Amino acid sequence: MKKLRIDLADRSYDILIGRNLLPRVGDHLVNPKRTRRALVVTNPVVSQLYGKSLSKGLESAELAIECVEIPEGETHKTLQDAQTVYDHLIEKQYDRNTLLVALGGGVIGDLTGFIAATFLRGVPYIQVPTTLLSQVDSSVGGKTAVNHPKGKNLIGAFYQPQLVVIDLDSLHSLPPDEFRAGMAEIIKYGVIEDPKLFAFLEKNSEKILAQDTECLAHIIETSCAIKAKVVERDERESNYRMVLNFGHTIGHAIEALTDYSRFKHGEAIAIGMVYAAKLSCQLGQCSQEAVQRIESLVKQYGLPSQLPEFSVEEYIQTMYRDKKAHDKNIRFILVKDIGRVEIVDRVAEADIQKVLLA
Ligand code: NAD
Ligand code: GLY
């Protein structure tokens, strides 16, 4: 097992990465003596697959365990779903010595983190991410949220977990398209911070897509280490953390224009990364070779690279509406080279139009 530490003063925590960790999770809890009860929040699919082995792990720390299941899918990351969990917590008289446990992908992780941030003004929680995307991205860094009918993640809080437990074995049951969507975020880390990771992904795609354990452990550890480093430097996204949004300006527009139903988040981000790279090259920031490498890698992992057909005007207007748009400016993370990016707050509309039409 590998242990990474994310250093955030009194909000610091460990990220454990390894095999067969769920039945041993009780060995790693923070303050197990003070915690009397744990409520696992999950969905029916993940509960069926991993609920028992996680419960076994928690019981070994002598916790009383209950489980609440929220229906599967992004449409269940809402205040109503949080209410279901609050109702259970209040009805069963849970107090501050309670541990919430998020068992699932990013939807369950974000929802559970939000409930933990708000129930009794904050109770501890741990993340047990079971999708590749949640293992390398959403479980680390403390962004929690629910969706609002007007947009994704509009209601939320920065609230760090006490522990992240990444059990590589849970990826075996993941549908291939979900696995590929997680790969988009790993490619992102290569582009923003780590040319060696990028080259490793180029060289080892067959093994990675076949879920070779050693390769997977390496890319997940490297990704989590990069994310930890970024979050340590700028926990609340006042500036530098925005590099993690590489590919998201166009990616979010694609998701919004297709009603969050045609593309998985990672797929939309893959297209967004390719077009952000093309824009960077058009603006003279990076070479054509860098663009080609990014586009080829996206394709190598079976991810889409072409924009779905909407008008340039629809794209631009949707980008202005994104919560990350800033003072009516569209912000992009531009590529300088593989492993190096720059946050640019004002990209001219004409330049964006040109790349969307190319
Ligand atoms: P998800 O949580 O919807 O999971 C995808 C699907 O995989 C679901 O159907 C789920 O039931 C299933 N599943 C989960 N684990 C499985 C397993 N081991 N085996 C088989 N099936 C399994 O999607 P996701 O991609 O994990 O997360 C997307 C969410 O994450 C979005 O809501 C997004 O906004 C959020 N997100 C948050 C952050 C953050 O920093 N907090 C970062 C990126 C994304
Ligand atoms: N997923 C982007 C972030 O955590 O900041």
Image: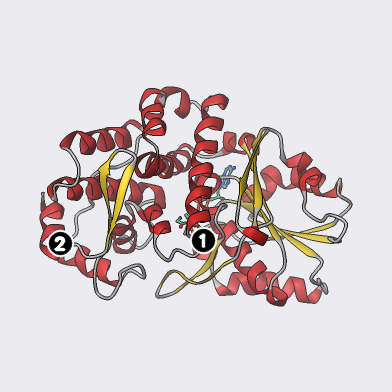
Q: Is mark 2 within 8 Å of ligand 1?
A: no
- Dot 2, crowdedness within 10 Å: few (<14), some or many (≥20)? some
Give the secondary structure at mark 1. loop
Q: CA distance from mark 1 to mark 2?
A: 34 Å
Q: Is residue 210 above or below residue 248?
A: above
Asked which quadrant contains residue 49, the reply is: top right
Give the secondary structure at mark 2. helix
Question: Which is nearer the eye, 52 or 272?
Answer: 272
Please give the label number shown on residue 312: 2
Labels 1, 2: front one: 1
Residue denoted by label 1: 235
> Could you tell me the amino acid type at mark 1?
Glu
Q: Position of residue 235 (x, y in %)?
A: 51, 61
Q: Position of residue 67 (x, y in %)?
A: 75, 58
Q: Position of residue 130 (x, y in %)?
A: 60, 45
Looking at the image, residue 188 sits to the left or right of residue 48; the answer is left
The mark that comes first in sequence, 1 or 2, is: 1
Q: Are marks 1 and 2 in contact (CB under 8 Å)?
A: no
> Could you tell me the amino acid type at mark 2?
Val
Task: Assign the N terminus to one quadrant of the image.
Answer: top right
Q: Position of residue 297 (x, y in %)?
A: 31, 33
